[in-house]
Image (cartoon, coloured by chain):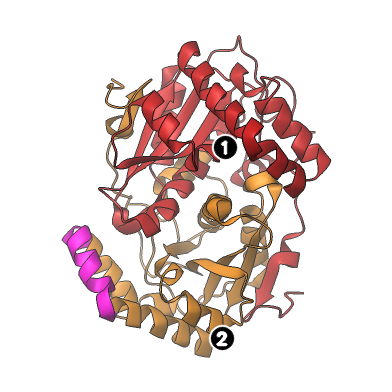
Chain colours: A orange, B red
Amino acid sequence: MSDLGSGTTENRSFAELVTHQRACRRFDAGADLPDEDVLTMITHATHAPSAENSQPWEFVVIRSIETRRRFGDIMSEAWAIGGADYVRQAAPPTVYADIEDGIAAGGLLTAPVVVVVCADLDRVAEPWSAASIYPATQNLLLSAAYLGYGSCLTTGLTTIFADQVRDLLSLPSTVVPMAGVYLGRAARRLGLPRRDPAATHMHRETYGNSWT
Amino acid sequence: MSDLGSGTTENRSFAELVTHQRACRRFDAGADLPDEDVLTMITHATHAPSAENSQPWEFVVIRSIETRRRFGDIMSEAWAIGGADYVRQAAPPTVYADIEDGIAAGGLLTAPVVVVVCADLDRVAEPWSAASIYPATQNLLLSAAYLGYGSCLTTGLTTIFADQVRDLLSLPSTVVPMAGVYLGRAARRLGLPRRDPAATHMHRETYGNSWT
């Protein structure tokens, strides 16, 4: 078991940090997440690469409980009208239970900060927007772990609910929400992430040619 | 000036690593990049989050000079028929010059290893494939920096040239190339990445509400 997400981890190596980082869906609602740490995480996010160094990202930082509740309502609606069915079919029961706890049972609402990561399509062509936003988003998650916070990346808002998120956050028409990142101190110790051995997804020279 | 990309950096903090990581487009063609380090980088890549922990990634690791040349030819063709014009219009002259050096002047061909990161659409629905692949790709770039290598993320292959890449690497029809990552020891010391101050892209509660 790891204590990432529930304490300071600044002396950990990158290898420890990256192999322990995993989704946190229930937070210590009373623990502080100061602006200074939010700024550090987003500074780290903006050091990711982007197409032609276009830096097309915009970060909306939500602390207000009203806005977080309304954001949660949008997620809950997405869950109710099809998200739950999709996840139940796509994921093993343990993953489904964890996501359900976050969305339907209020876990994610305990996060004191939600960062909505957006792409400004005035600054990057649409085919390259995702490649310019999700690397920055991953830096944000790793930086949270580095500073001792838990985090959860959600992308349900990128589909039919994007317009509701746009209304909620007053996003201009060219600014597209790509990720909702929940941040805070983890409510409990997080286990290690479950992953296949890397070599099972590696190919030598051409697809299907075994790595080992 | 930083020496990331040209030596071991395993004792650097995450904050140093993430703020120094930047694109490297010319490598020391004689320097080795052993399989062990490739496996470490891809292991780190696979610890990124993915939709419902679907882990839809596949990594094709290219060392063969013939395949690297043919891959480079595809990139050069994309550059010639429109890529150069697009980048010239979208990016400042220094960025254009750097990309041109990599693609048109053979810089990227000096990388001893190219990893093509793919999404298997049998394992993730298309709207969430990018959010499940680019975080892993960013872990790969950071891991390269951690191990003292330079790296360059390219995504030109995701468009009309995806079919040529599919042919070259024998990708099944459900496996989509999303990124070409060049890896090796940097040929020269890399400067710090140029980035806007993070706060200029941050908003409080709603878009347009200044962070500071």
Q: Is residue B191 visible?
A: no
Kind of residue sitting beneath label 1:
Thr
Q: Nearer the viewer, residue B47 or A174?
A: A174
The residue drawn where x is 81% and y is 38% is: B94
- Give residue A64's mark: 2
Q: Left of B211 or right of it: where is A154?
A: left
Residue A83 rendering spot, x and y as whole percentages:
28, 72
Does the magenta stretch mainly form a helix, a strand or a loop? helix
- The relative height of residue A50 versus residue A77 in the rendered view (above or below) is above
Magenta stretch: includes residue A140: no
Provide the residue designation for mark 1: B154
**Label 1 and label 2 in one chain:** no
Residue B129 rendering spot, x and y as whole percentages:
39, 52
The residue drawn where x is 82% and y is 40% is: B93
Kind of residue sitting beneath label 2:
Ser
Give the residues in magenta: A80-94
Q: Quarter of the image holding residue B57?
A: top left
- Considering every residue shown, the one lying at the far top of the view is B30
- The relative height of residue A144 versus residue B68 in the rendered view (above or below) is below
The C terminus of chain A sits in image quarter: top left
Dot 1: what SS? Answer: strand
Dot 2: what SS? Answer: loop
Residue A47 rendering spot, x and y as whole percentages:
66, 49
Q: Nearer the viewer, mark 1 or mark 2?
A: 1
- The relative height of residue A50 versus residue B180 in the rendered view (above or below) is below
Q: Which of A162 and B51 is in front in this view?
A: A162
Residue A89 rendering spot, x and y as whole percentages:
18, 62
